[in-house]
Image: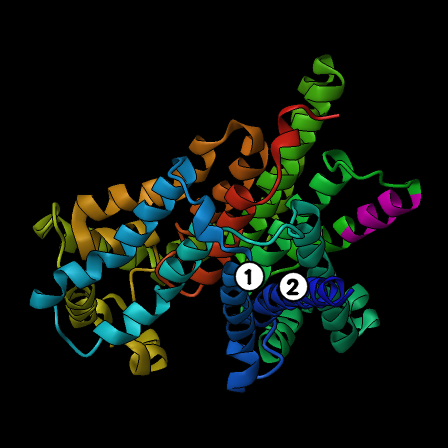
Amino acid sequence: MKLEKNLAGCSVFHYGVNMLNIIGMFWILLSWVWGLSTERWYVYGGLYLFFATWAIEVVLEKRWQNFHWDKRKIYYTIVITFFCLPLIYAPWDGSVHFHRLLEYRLGLIGFSLVGILGINKYYNLELMFGCFIGIAFAMVVYLFSLVGWDTLVHDPNRMYLLAETRIAHINAHMQFNFFLNVALVGIWYWLFYTQHKVTIYWRILLSIVALVLIITLLLSEGRSGLLACLMVVGSLTLYQTWQWRKWACVVVMAIVLGSAGYVVSHHQRMSQGAVNSELRIRYWGLATKLIAQKPILGYGMSSAQEEFSKYSADCCTEAEREHWQAYFDVIDAHNQYLQIMLEFGCVGLLFLLSVYLGPVIIDQSHRIVSVYLVGLSMFQSVFDMFVTGGFCILFCVLVLMMLNMNVSHLSNPE
């Protein structure tokens, strides 16, 4: 009897640790995208909770006993090696930027260890996408309520009012819009591919949420988020049409392309003048020139930052120079592919592409989901630092979703 009570107590404790781990994951997503507080407990609390409870899970379940090498383990080893590239270069690459830049990448090694030893059995794609959808919808409702519903409908400057309010109370458009696009993929998954039975009422609710998220992205000043939204919604519409009636794809494609063209041509920041004056394009040109000098092995992580900082101010107009003068020491190429080639040359680019494409290649059973999550990540990487920047933690979470959660049923959609 005493043994049974002890076993029951252990089971309850184990379940509690599992639930706390999931809460930690939710907290990571929330704090990454929603700047409710700058306090350290909010920004890092989810990471502490997640990794502490994960370590307890590993011990309780003795996961090392079932360890064996497979394609997933090899992939995570590649990610760890990618993280170690700055350390390999370190003897020739010591500067003031080293520790700051390395800190951005710590998620790569932490979450790779999680991927190698596994996560608890209560995780699944439905749960994770549900977290994305819930947080995304809550942020949008909060944003709209701050701006005012009447303003959204009648004010011609609604785009910039939304941008100012979102920056002040939530986050910049890059992270916000990316999160919303992942949520749209999640809604598609829930509507068409989940194993759970979704009632008509939930389908209607999810469709309304999708419409609200799409409208928000269409009203955003962020061009990359808008383009990503058009690609996700357009391609998923075509994909589902193909599954339903192949002959209707031609008509749907015409509608999708026409609608996307109209949206892009009428967006305030998509004009030829706005694109040509984009500072990011000049940074890309500077990065390309620097890469040409050391194309194979690059400059090293920290030295690349120093080299880029020397000339970044020369790319700016006088007004831009005054606006960005406090950031020239830390500003980057605003392109993950160019930045990694600056740091580690073609060798680094090969590692980066392996990190991106690995989840798509490894397991065909989840390929349809992986294509969209990886595609969004690779597209966003054209315009910002991703794996080695502020998106690192979220990308690691997406990789866990693709490789460590039960998605085998996707090979036989209902």
Using the image as rendered, state which of residue 343 and residue 248 is in the foreground.
343
Nearest to N terminus: mark 1 or mark 2? 2
The residue beneath circle 1 is: 60
- Secondary element under disc 2, as helix, strand or loop, is helix
Can residue 239 be seen? Answer: yes
Q: Which amino acid does label 2 sit on?
A: His
Residue 330 screen position, x and y as percent: 28, 74
From the viewer's perspective, tell me whether residue 106 is left or right of residue 212. Answer: left
Task: Identify the amino acid type marked 1.
Answer: Leu
Q: Residue 183 carries which label?
A: none
Q: In which quarter of the image is residue 34?
A: bottom right
> Residue 227's spot in the image, x, y percent?
55, 46
Residue designated by label 2: 14
Residue at 45% over, 39% down: 359
**Rendered residue at 38%/63% (across/down):** 389
Res. 99 image quadrant:
bottom left
Specify the color scheme.
rainbow
Q: Which element is circle 1 on?
A: helix
Relative to 63, does residue 328 appear above or below in the rendering?
below
Q: In which quarter of the image is the C terminus?
A: top right
Rounded to the nearest whole Å, what is the CA distance between mark 1 and mark 2?
Answer: 7 Å
Query: Measuring 74% from the left and 75% from the top, which residue is drawn there?
Result: 147
Q: Is residue 132 magenta?
A: no
